Image (spheres, grey):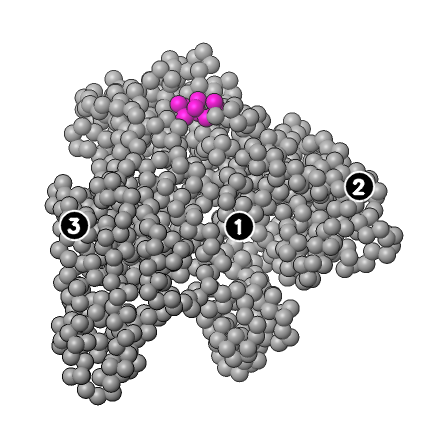
Amino acid sequence: MPATTTTSGKPTVGKAAAGRPSRAVSARPAAGAAPAAGAAAGEPRLLLLDGHSLAYRAFFALPVENFSTTTGQPTNAVYGFTSMLINVLRDERPTHVAVAWDLPTPTFRHTQYAEYKAGRAETPADFVGQVSLIHQVCDSLAVPGVTAAGYEADDVIATLATQGAALGMQVLVVTGDRDALQLVDERVTVLMTRRGISDMTRFTPAEVEAKYGLTPTQYPDFAALRGDPSDNLPSVPGVGEKTATKWIQQFGSLAALVDRADEVGGKAGASLRAHLANVIRNRSLTELARDVPLAVTPTDLQLRPWDREAVHQLFDTLQFRVLRERLYAALGTVEPEADAGFEVTAQTLAPGEVAGWLAAHTGDGQRLGVYVRGSWGRGTGSVTGLAFATADGAGAGAWIDPVALTADDDAALAAWLADDSRPKAVHDVKGPILALAARGFSLAGVTSDTALAAYLALPGQRTFDLADLVLRYLRRDLRPETSETGQLTIDGSDEAAAAAADVVRARATLELADALDADLARRGATALLRDVELPLVTVLAGMERAGIAADTDHLLDLQKHYGAQVTEVAAQAQEIVGRPFNLSSPKQLQVILFDELGLPKTKKIKTGYTTDADALAWLSTQADHPLLAVLLRHRDVARLRTVVDSLIPMIDDAGRVHTTFNQMIAATGRLSSADPNLQNIPVRTAEGRQIRRAFVVGAGYESLLTADYSQIEMRIMAHLSGDKGLIGAFASGEDLHTFVAAQAFGIPVDEVDPELRRRIKAMSYGLAYGLSAFGLAGQLGIHPEEAREQMEAYFARFGGVRDFLRGVVERARADGYTETILGRRRYLPDLTSDNTQRRQMAERMALNAPIQGSAADIIKIAMLGVDRKLREHGARSRLLLQVHDELVLEIAPGERADVEALVRTEMGGAYQMSVPLEVSVGSGRTWDDAAH
């Protein structure tokens, strides 16, 4: 008899038949970590954070160039602050929490000293706008902000800390400002950021004395002598920290030192006496106010459950995939508890029982949830288990390996999996398709992929984990728990436990599919999932399995060639400079370019001025120095060598490279490629195209064929805008950009020179991507006013384009989203933001999304059509790659002409527009030879 386990929100432990163990699996948040050491059980703990201090610390700790959204919004300060907040909430387990913020208005210290904080550097442009995002993060996590007019954040903290200690709370202050050390006592501990965003020193009274040789009450006396350049508080000339410490230790306090200043000898004593007024003023300004009138008290700051949906929406916008996962893992006791578990009966199937279970539970066209346990990647995979769940609560886990199925089971399972009339719900189905295919099974009848459905509903999100979506949509939790031991560990060694957990996942997938079906219907995306994205999964899986043949010898030759080029170019650069240096070291380049050569400064970053490729390209337009061209050449050949180095290990035993196509990365709907990224193989330079020559036709095939759309973004622009001039440009038979330039500037076609054509091409494509006059000026190397005049001339001739672009933003602002020709939405909440930078970025996205997204829709329809026709004709030729607007096929002997005709028909007819879709085709032995 099979083992059965009933799983629900109230776990019980069942007995397994035939000596096989079973577990009850339920869904509840994991227990939180214990409070930090030193806190008495049940003792209230007040956590106070210095908002601006920590935000600045985070901004300078993380490089802005590595932290920004796809819209260009810098997020390094937000990411660092949020990371610190998560860590301290997790580690300290406070019962009460608040963030204190500075206000932009003057404080009482400015009244006492007009030059207070004068001379501070201008706020970095990349920091602007991030503080408001940090406020949103705090709001979504239910962490209140506290401010007080006329006071600074550390005064607010001092007041709340003093009040909290008086109420018997343990108080923790997190800051980067050393003035907070004066607050330290037996009930107040300061966590001082030391390096980066994760290294903190815990200052207790003993630690303050060990670090500074002073008590916390003596610290502001010491600070008054030391001064603070950041606050424009002058030090005593000739008096360093050691001397200041010695004086306070000797006299006991600053007041005593001032009274007995005549006793201090030498030049230092004379300097002290000459600057006593500054020291006394410093002491007054350094003292933190502990009686600030506030609208809240410490007891009002009790930690509250945070809003999971608000966190989802904000973290989607910020693209904080990893932080979201850390948040859920770290703060389980704070997030809303799941409403219930899953009522299922989990049956562990033994060999010989699979066929009977399927026959008994899969009739009447009911959809089953399917969960595949296994691994996959690089075009293949393996299955270690299968689980099924029905809507009525029945479920089964069928273990395939190492338990062998009987021939009847194998046949029944294969037939059911391949049966298109048996509806199935699967999560992230492409991996399971690859794993099942490796075992000889095909998978059909999938009516919902819950990861893909969630992607269409939440296109700004970057991860679609099953457990996360289940909690988000169903208010349930997949983390299994037993009544005997608490957390159930599933490692595959206990078949019954693992099968039961898999059945819960299958049932969760089934219920999630129902919820997402309703959500997609509300969003108008049902057809997009059913007719485009779901069928495309099977096509992509086939492309990944096929891979593309690679010429290993050619790649090895290129590796040697580019390696020699890197060495040669480095030697040229070192000869120009006159000494050896590391061309890949930003620090060394900064010294050479800006200090020694005195070249114009580039964008300011934490370590100085940026020396990235864009900065070097800009410098080359500003200064005529031979080193710049050599550095740019080094960047180029080093990048080519990196590409080749990454490809060689990816070639499998059959001589083929298998990429992974991602449907759920780009919010616009475009596919991406990874491990390796074959969409990033260089094509614009002859040297880069040598890498494309490494991709060749495989054994048993005749050639590679490439087909792509010509100027698809501009054709979509013409269709969506209905601009008669642009539609006429395509109908003219002339070169598009030459014709458009002639129309825009009222000159004959034959008078359009290459430079004007280049400018019009950049403008036409730039408009489709939300390019501003300033951005166009940067691209063309002209003055922004000249770029603006050219854009006005363009719009004067092509008014339909101007009206369309304005209308796109206005509709998106009203609706909250843009739509493609197939109804693919991109949600843009920042269109109504009061932050100008974020609003303008959202407007550029609104301009770009319908055009780029529609291009993605069209190429996907074309892929489905090409694949379908190849199968209908019984062709051996097959799709291998999709690279933006290009398809790459491997052509079987004798099928070249038929396949070309088929591809032209399916691509050209993928979507009917007011201008035709023009398809270019080429073929050859290598990918480069097949270019056209």
Q: Which of marks 3 and 2 is nearer the N terminus?
A: 3
Q: Earlier in the sequence, mark 1 or mark 3?
A: 3
Q: Residues within 10 Å of mark 1 (few under 14, many from 20)?
A: some
Which residue bears the numbered disc 1?
Answer: 837
Which residue is rendered at x = 60% and y = 66% of the image? 618
Q: What residue type is labelled 3?
A: Ala
Which residue bears the numbered disc 2?
Answer: 725
Residue 430 percent location from the top left of the image: 48, 34
Q: Which of 853 and 868 is in front in this view?
A: 853
Whether residue 457 can be seen here: yes
Determine whether 582 is above or below 139 in the image: below
Q: What stretch is highlighted in magenta?
A: 510-518
Q: Nearer the viewer, residue 117 or 631?
A: 117
Image quarter in which the N terminus is found: top left
Which residue bears the numbered disc 3?
Answer: 165
Q: Which of marks 1 and 2 is nearer the N terminus?
A: 2
Magenta stretch: dominant secondary structure: helix
Secondary structure of residue under mark 2? helix
Q: Which of 292 and 489 is in front in this view?
A: 292
Secondary structure of residue under mark 3? helix
